[in-house]
Image: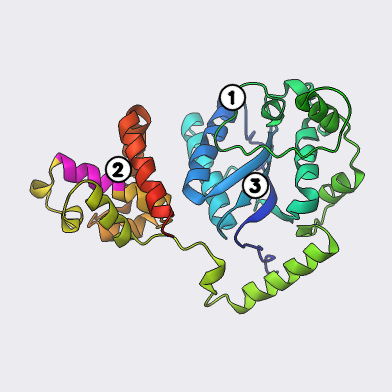
Amino acid sequence: MARPQRIEFNQACYYVSSQGRGNKTLFPGREYRKMFLDLFDETCDRFNVDIYAYCILKNEYHLLLNTRDANLSRVMRYLNGVYTQRYNSNRFGEGPLFYGRYKATVIDPENYLERVGRYIHCLPKYAGCDIGLEESFHSSITHYLGEGSTPRWLKIVSAITDTGSGTHNERYARYVANCTDVEVRHFFERKKRPPVLGSADFQEKMRTTTQGIKKNREGRDMRNYFVRPEIDNIVNEVAREYELDSYALYRTQEEEKTKKVILARNVAMTLSQDIGGHTLKDIASVFGIKNYRSVSILVGRFKNLINNQDSLRSQYVELRMRLLSRC
């Protein structure tokens, strides 16, 4: 039986969940939850994603997110795939970690965004966890209640309807504690969950969108999609920034690579993956690198470098924004 088609389009809002496989525990401790949350930062930067809410339980996780590009499949492949690699590396394990495919539901943001966020924040209570909602390390509710610093990848959305007394945080706490949204809870607890949660008009819009995707599978109308910069454009911009000839960044002879050229190449390769969305194989081919895995190593080293050098990070961010502004 064919798998159901994923609905992917620009600025799509999704509720996504994934479970652990067999007797493996996805998040055996605080260290693993932190490792997973750290991965959100990488994923959001690389794939142009906003996360609105999350909940991490012992053997599953739940997300409310927005994909600015039509790329949910790539986002989830990266998120689950990289976490599996790091999990297995830590525990000297091997093989799949997640059970089957992730589940994804398109959300009507105008009518259900806050309601689904509240449902996600209520999940520890529904699951019978031994933690109070306001003390939950497992979910984003701590940030919604103003506790601790909010990570840059988390976008707070809390247009609550509670007009009672107290601060905004106190009113949101009441809003979440009142876990009585029977419609939303029933929807997500169904064995065969529909692919869309929204008003009748929104569901009709999604049916039209799905038909359009099927018709344009071979050749999509690119006006509906974010156009990412090509590698050549990235190389040219980086070369201008470092006052180099673009050709210098393509050279493969080691003796011709100065420290400046090596740095510029690493910047260009990282941007090609980060905002260009190009595969490691494509980047390796353009830059004359025999093994595409070497690109992953070089990009990883450069990201560690900019995390420790403020001036270099500022320069990288400025280049990134300059390229994105032209897309």
In the image: residue 272, left or right of residue 238: right
Mark linked to residue 65: 3
Q: Which residues are magenta?
A: 259-267
Q: Which mark is residue 298?
A: 2
Which residue matches tag 1?
149
Q: Residues within 10 Å of mark 2 (few under 14, many from 20)?
A: some
State whether the magenta stretch is mostly helix, strand or loop. helix
In this view, which residue lies farthest toward the left?
Answer: 255
Of circles 1 and 2, the one toward us is: 1
**Image quadrant containing the N terminus:** bottom right
- For the point 65% across and 47% down, the residue is 65
Residue 244 shown left or right of residue 57 in the figure: left
Residue type, mark 3 in image: Leu
The first of marks 2 and 3 along the sequence is: 3
Disc on res. 222: none
217 w.r.t. 175: above or below: below
Task: For marks 1 and 3, give the one nearer the viewer.
Answer: 1
